[in-house]
Amino acid sequence: MSLDHFRKPSQPSAGTTGHQEDGWCDGYTLPHPVWSEEELNSVQITHTPLEKPVDTAAYYSVQMLRTGFDLLSGYSWGKRFGTLDEKMWLPRIIYLETVAGVPGMIGAMVRHLKSLRCMTRDHGWIHTLLEEAENERMHLLTALELRRPGPLFKIAVIGTQGVFVSMFWIAYFLSPRFCHKFVGYLEEEAVKTYTHCIEVLSKQPTRGCGRIQNLLRLLSATADCLVMQ
C-alpha cells in the first residue's frame, strides 16, 4: 500500500526538522506513536463508567448519533443479516474518519483563541489536539488508498461538516469536558466497530481484505489510546 500522501519537493524546505528520505523532509508533520504488531493485536473493548451528569449526556449523545447513522448507512441491517463485506465497510470507515478529524481541530482552535484572549499559557493542549486532528486525517488518507468516494459521497461529507463543525464549536465553547467525554465514548464505539469489522473480514478471504484488516488494527489501536487518555 502506498503512503505517499504528500508532494515531495525537489529540495527540503529551509528551517525544517525531522528525518529526510530520498531528499524529502517531513519536518512539518506532527509526531505520532508507532504501534508494534503486538500492541495492535492487544486492543480490548473497554468502557469508562459514567461519573457525572455531563458524562451521561455525552455518552447518550454518542449512542443516539450512532443508532441513527447505523440505520441510515445500512450497517444495522447488514450486521443483522450477515451481509457486511469490504464494499460496505470502506465507505463507512472513510465517512467516519472525515468526522473524527473535526473535534481535535475545533478544540485546538477554541483553546488557541482563549490563550490569545486571556493571554495565558495552554500547557500543551493545543499541540495535543492538533496532533490528534492530523492523526485522524492520516487515517482518512490511508483508507482512501483502498477506495475513492464519488461526488455524492463528497457532498454528504460537506453537509456533515457544516453541521458538525458548528455544533461541536458551540459545545466546546460551553463545556470542554462534555466534548472530551463525547470523543472518548465515540472512540469506544470505534473500537467496537473496527473489532467487529476485523472479525467479519477475517472470515471472508477475498482480495484486499488483508489490507483493510491492517488498517483497522491501526485505527483500533489509536482509538483505544484515546479512550485511555
Image (cartoon, helix red, strand yellow):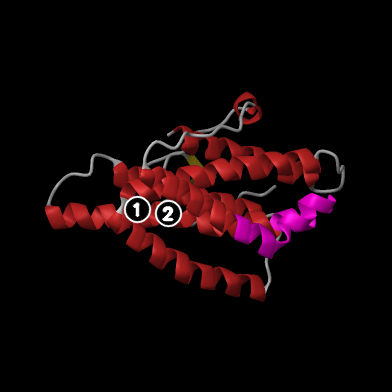
Q: Name the one closer to the observer, 65 or 183.
A: 65
Instruction: Work out whether residue 15 can be spotted.
Output: no
Task: Give the image location of residue 23, x and y in percent.
Answer: 50, 47
Number of numbered labels in the structure image: 2
* Above or below, comparing residue 93 to residue 228 in the picture: below
Choose between 159 and 78: the one closer to the eye.
78
Q: Is residue 7 left or right of residue 106?
A: right
How far apart in space, not on screen, are marks 2 and 1 (Cα)? 6 Å
Q: Position of residue 228 (x, y in %)?
A: 47, 32
Q: Which residue is mark 1?
A: 107
Q: Kindly identify the residue that appears in the image at 60 percent across and 40 percent down.
A: 191
- Which residue type carries mark 1? Gly
**Seen in the image, is 32 located left or right of residue 177?**
right
Question: Are the residues at dot 2 and dot 1 in contact (C-beta closer than 8 Å)?
Answer: yes
Mark carried by residue 76: none
Say what secondary structure mark 2 lies in: helix
Question: Residue visible at 19% across and 52% down?
Answer: 115
145 is within the stretch colored magenta: no
Q: Secondary structure at mark 1?
A: helix
Q: Position of residue 173 (x, y in %)?
A: 29, 58
Is residue 112 visible to us here? Answer: yes
- Residue farthest to the front? 53
The residue that label 2 is drawn on is: 103
Q: What's the magenta region?
A: 67-90
User: Label 2 is placed on what type of residue?
Assistant: Pro
Principal secondary structure, stretch drawn in magenta: helix
**Image quarter hosting the C terminus:** top left
Q: Give coordinates of residue 60: x percent, y percent.
A: 50, 50
